[in-house]
Image: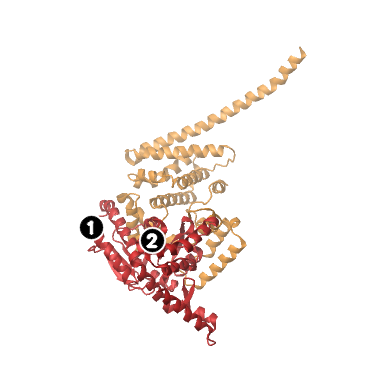
Chain colours: A red, B orange
Amino acid sequence: MATALRLIARSLRKNKIQPLYNSCSFLHSHATSFGFKEVREEEKSQMVGNVFTSVASSYDLMNDVMSGGLHRLWKERLVSKLNPFPGMKHLDVAGGTGDVAFRILESINSVKNRALLDVHDDNLLEETKIYVCDINPNMLNVGKKRAQERGLGDNSSLIWVEGDAEALKFEDDSMDGYTIAFGIRNVTHIEKALAEACRVLKRGGRFLCLELSHVEVPVFKELYDYYSFSVIPAIGELVAGDRESYQYLVESIRRFPSQEKFASMIAEAGFQKVEYENLVGGVVAIHSGVKF
Amino acid sequence: MYRLAAKRLLPAVGRWNPRFRCSSSGVRALAGVINPLRFYTSASSGTIPDQNPDNFDASASSSSTAWSQEERSRADDETQRSRNTTRPRAHWQDEEARVLQASLRHVIRLGWTDAAMIAGARDVGMSPSIVGSFPRKEAALVEFFMDDCLQRLIDIIDTKDDFKNLIPSHRVSKLVKIRLEMQAPYISKWPQALSVQAQPLNIPTSFKQRAMLVDEIWHAADDEAADIDWYVKRTVLGGIYSTTELYMLTDTSPDFQDTWAFLDERIRDAFDLKKTVQEAKYLAEAVGAGIGGSLPGFMKSVFNS
């Protein structure tokens, strides 16, 4: 895997030397970032795929180790911001292991007791549909397995779909909510993914994105940088046996647009009331927008 | 003048006034300044794509101190860029108002709750998901109702002329009555609304809304004094308003007759008090003048002897 990455990087470098290519136009028209490396667009999705295939089995364990369990709180916060309701049609993109989807389902089922007193519509709960969409079948398999362990294996509300965030297989105006947690960073064309999110949402539907973001707090930033570049790859090697993938992870965080920039990208995709909230000083940020 | 004073005292101004509706760009600019200092921050840039010129002017002038030149130019760029993209069909604040307005119909059945807002969103063909985007959930509904009532009260004050024929105390009690009658349909759920307003997070807004309401009523009563009385009067009326509101909750008389009788008495008491205070002041002045006159005479007589 590691050698493969290096090979690709090397072949790229060779390409750039060729006189036929203007290196600058090459970068802008056909290249994208894979961590700190520049790779061809077609290759990024495949390389990201390789990363997640290699870490799928230890993905959740690694999340716990790297964030000290904080990622659970972040996901709780995401779901509480989403404010799920019975009868909701929700799409969770890049949520292969089902972490966010399970939380949404739990939240709806706990609201249920309260809502049943008020809303007389009993069918509402059966109408609840949570689509978990992931481009990587390995991640989806992990999620399905976990659903079974939680006794949600034959729950009709959970639907597992293999699909690309840039070309969703859902109809226009069909979803109440769209979440993407720690996923949009790995998408080759962020704008396309945002446009797709906007397309599938109903009027009044909400887009929520949980993503590792940029820390600007002075001393904390240095600590965080040290942690990400020195500690995380080492943990990755120790726990998941894969240093390169986690090197990619921390690099891709640095390549991701800043909170403000990403917020304006969301607004450009057609969302309104775009807001973001920094958690832990910007280590993660939750961006949200509403489609009207 | 009082309105201005109230707005200066209570910044960030309620949403009832459309001129002040769009203050989130200002908030964003401020947040940009504060951001690095805090561990837990949030900011909004919701108005980037849908700035219309009016809103933009209002927000820029209301927060001009917080906007650096650079930010201004960036905002200008953003507005220019947004003009090139397709203009959204409706302004999100109008849409939110529509959802909340529709939710009010469900309040009697479902209370001031998420469920009412979800039902309201369904009524106007919006995804109920939008409810999650309201800050402080139920408070949004209660505050919307308060703003709505205030706006209606202002409309009534502006359009009806017969107030001018009433003496001030009647004018005040009539306005309080009109305002309280607006929440009569929701009386069975009003305790819930009060408890929502009393939650620590919501207190600043509910306090502000009440202050503006009381200010508006005094303003309509043609009260032009700008001295220390200004505070006394508003505090007294605020007290009367809230007491009457509570009295109304347990009032079972037809059409709340007891409540209105109670209100009239309280207002009369207050105006009597005002007279009493005035008389006490005159007395004090007279006594002061008397002492002032007699003291030098007294001293003179002491030194002479």
Q: Pointer 2 indicates a residue of which chain?
A: A
**Above or below B49: residue A24:** below
Residue holding disc 1: A122
**Above or below A175: residue A75:** above
Residue type pointed to by label 1: Asp
The quarter in which the C terminus of chain B is drawn is: top right
Q: Pointer 1 indicates a residue of which chain?
A: A
Q: Residue furthest right?
A: B304
A102 relative position to B52: left or right: left
Crowding near pointer 2: few (<14 within 10 Å), some, many (20+)? Answer: some
**Percent x, y for residue A9?**
47, 77
Q: Are marks 2 and 1 in contact (CB under 8 Å)?
A: no
Name the residue: 51% across, 63% down: A260
N-terminal of the pair, mark 2 or mark 1, is 2
Nearer to the camera, B108 or A243: A243
Residue B64 numbered mark, or none: none
Residue A280 visible (yes or no): yes
Nearer to the camera, B82 or A210: A210
Residue type pointed to by label 2: Asn
A90 relative position to B61: left or right: left
- Cα distance between the residues tagged 2 and 1: 38 Å
Q: Secondary structure at mark 1?
A: loop
Residue holding disc 2: A63
Name the residue: 39% across, 76% down: A46
**Percent x, y for residue A292?**
41, 65
Which quadrant of the view contains residue B123? bottom left
**Percent x, y for residue B234?**
51, 40
Nearer to the camera, B74 or B243: B74
